[in-house]
Image: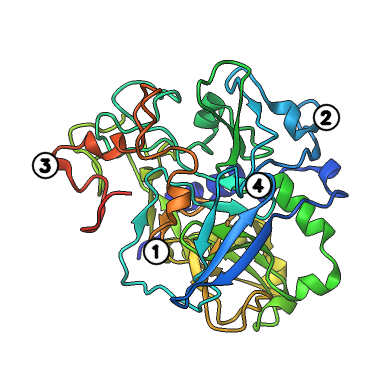
């Protein structure tokens, strides 16, 4: 495949704007809280994992790169663009969100590359190891400016704003340091509490977790959470002792930005295309191309000597290598050492490059996650529609914009 200077510049730009971690010295001495889980086998032989504990981020300290002052995560909310406080009473278990999954990692299930992926369609992706819900979804383009108060695809455009893209993050109040913000709760008004959730890699939590790991835990893969469809979510850096290669393994996505001016792409409405170039504002600005991505990373390593934490010198010395993930941002764990299972399995990865949080499920997500943030239908007491509006806005002619692969909507 041809690989030109423009591709290199795009890759360099991606590496420059997607740092692995912000500097967060204040968080490094803190041990993140860990959610509680219970694993039980049903009469049908399925293993079900239930979650309990606070659905609230720890109030980690960090060094603000702009003000050069120490700040605390909870002090970032409310803000001018996210005027809601963090609901510190939110719970995952009984009396709260009641989250549970069929644990497919424990059952040794490995999805095939031929299996059609499940679109997230505003279902939260999973729960992080600190108890915070992970939900990368953003509002949808409808021909006008982004409206975070009306996130549904009301015009059936198929173009979803990416909340971790800098300009969109500023609009919806997602600070780069935490990659998360507060979802307004029922009857939301300025200053009222809401659910804090992650849109991208939880940078503060990850930095604190990595720094606080005892040596023996570095001999297994660092687990960062559980997906709504029942698989482990793991770190993108796998230490040499935690895999069979004998090298530190860096896991990257296989996604690259499309080239040129925006035009209709798969699963979008050809009559409603956002203006501008493919710059990352929208999820659909990206395409899965592992061949081009590998060439891009190798070129960046040659020109800059580093790509998102992977050093060219370590690659040359044979102490580090990298691997690209599949379209769902996951991989078969044959070469990895997992504390949770000794059987062959599969896991998702939170990556330092786009998409950070996967944008496809490999299997049907749990019913408890499907109503965790946005229910299918809003209660009668609230006039706002539920998630059903996401797909009822599409006519029969546009039925492939939100793909269900012949399955009923969530």
Residue found at the very far right of the displayed protein: 29
- Front residue of 79 and 225: 225
Distance, label 3 to label 4, CA atoms, is 39 Å
* Rendered residue at 43%/46% (across/down): 123
Res 202 label = 4
Image: 217 above or below 151: below
Please report contact status of discs 1 and 4: CB closer than 8 Å, yes or no.
no
Residue drawn at 49 percent across, 53 percent down:
8
Mark 1 or 4 closer to N-term?
Answer: 4
Residue 407 is situated, as x and y percent measured from the top left of the image, at 24, 57
Provide the residue designation for mark 1: 363
Label of residue 397 in the image? 3
Mark 3 and mark 4 lie on one chain; the one further toward the N terminus is 4
Please say if 247 is above or below 229.
below
> From mark 3 to mark 2, how far is it between C-alphas?
53 Å
Element carrying mark 1 = loop
Q: Indicate which label's residue lies in the foreground, 4 or 2.
A: 4
Q: CA distance from mark 3 to mark 1?
A: 26 Å
Circle 3 or circle 1, nearest the eye: 1
Check whether the beta carbons of the residues at disc 3 and disc 4 lie within 8 A of each other. no
Q: What whole-number distance in Å separates the C-alpha atoms at marks 1 and 4? A: 24 Å
Q: Residue under circle 2?
A: 68
Please name the residue shown 41% across and 39% down the image: 375
Separation (CA) of disc 4 from disc 2: 20 Å
Q: Earlier in the sequence, mark 3 or mark 1?
A: 1
The x, y position of residue 135, in whole percent, is 51, 44
| Residue 345 placement, left or right of 270 | right
* Residue 286 visible from this viewpoint: yes
> Image quadrant of residue 240?
bottom right
Where is residue 301 drawn, in percent x and y?
61, 61
Label 4's element?
A: loop
């Amino acid at each position: 495949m041809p690989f030109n200077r423009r591709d290199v510049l795009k890759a360099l730009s991606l590496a420059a704007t997607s740092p692995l971690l912000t500097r967060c010295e204040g968080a490094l001495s803190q041990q993140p809280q860990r959610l509680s889980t219970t694993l039980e086998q049903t009469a049908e032989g399925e293993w079900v994992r239930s979650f309990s504990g606070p659905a609230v981020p720890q109030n980690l300290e960090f060094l603000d790169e702009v003000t050069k002052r120490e700040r605390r995560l909870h002090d970032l909310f409310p803000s001018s663009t996210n005027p809601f406080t963090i609901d510190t009473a939110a719970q995952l278990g009984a009396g709260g969100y009641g989250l549970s999954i069929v644990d497919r990692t424990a059952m040794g299930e490995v999805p095939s590359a031929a299996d059609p992926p499940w679109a997230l369609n505003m279902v939260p992706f999973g729960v992080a190891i600190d108890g915070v819900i992970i939900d990368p979804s953003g509002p949808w383009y409808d021909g006008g400016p982004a409206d975070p108060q009306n996130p549904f695809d009301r015009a059936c455009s198929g173009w979803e704003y990416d909340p971790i893209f800098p300009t969109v993050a500023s609009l919806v109040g997602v600070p780069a340091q935490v990659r998360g913000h507060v979802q307004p709760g029922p009857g939301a008004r300025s200053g009222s509490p809401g659910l804090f959730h992650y849109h991208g890699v939880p940078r503060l939590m990850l930095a604190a977790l990595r720094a606080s790991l005892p040596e023996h835990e570095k001999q297994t893969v660092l687990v960062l959470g559980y997906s709504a469809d029942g698989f482990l979510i793991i770190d993108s850096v796998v230490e040499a002792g935690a895999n069979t290669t004998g090298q530190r393994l860096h896991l990257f996505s296989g996604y690259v930005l499309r080239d040129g001016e925006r035009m209709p792409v798969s699963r979008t409405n050809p009559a409603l295309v956002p203006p501008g170039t493919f710059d990352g504002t929208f999820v659909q600005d990206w395409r899965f191309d592992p061949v081009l991505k590998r060439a891009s990373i190798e070129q960046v390593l040659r020109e800059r000597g580093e790509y998102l934490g992977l050093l060219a010198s370590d690659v040359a010395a044979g102490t580090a290598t990298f691997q690209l993930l599949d379209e769902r941002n996951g991989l078969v764990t044959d070469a990895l050492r997992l504390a949770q299972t000794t059987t062959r399995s599969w896991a998702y990865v939170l990556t330092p490059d786009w998409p950070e949080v996967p944008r496809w499920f490999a299997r049907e997500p749990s019913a408890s996650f499907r109503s965790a943030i946005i229910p299918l239908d809003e209660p009668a007491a609230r006039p706002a529609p539920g998630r059903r509006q996401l797909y009822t806005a599409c006519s029969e002619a546009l039925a492939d914009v939100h793909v269900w692969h012949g399955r009923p909507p969530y």
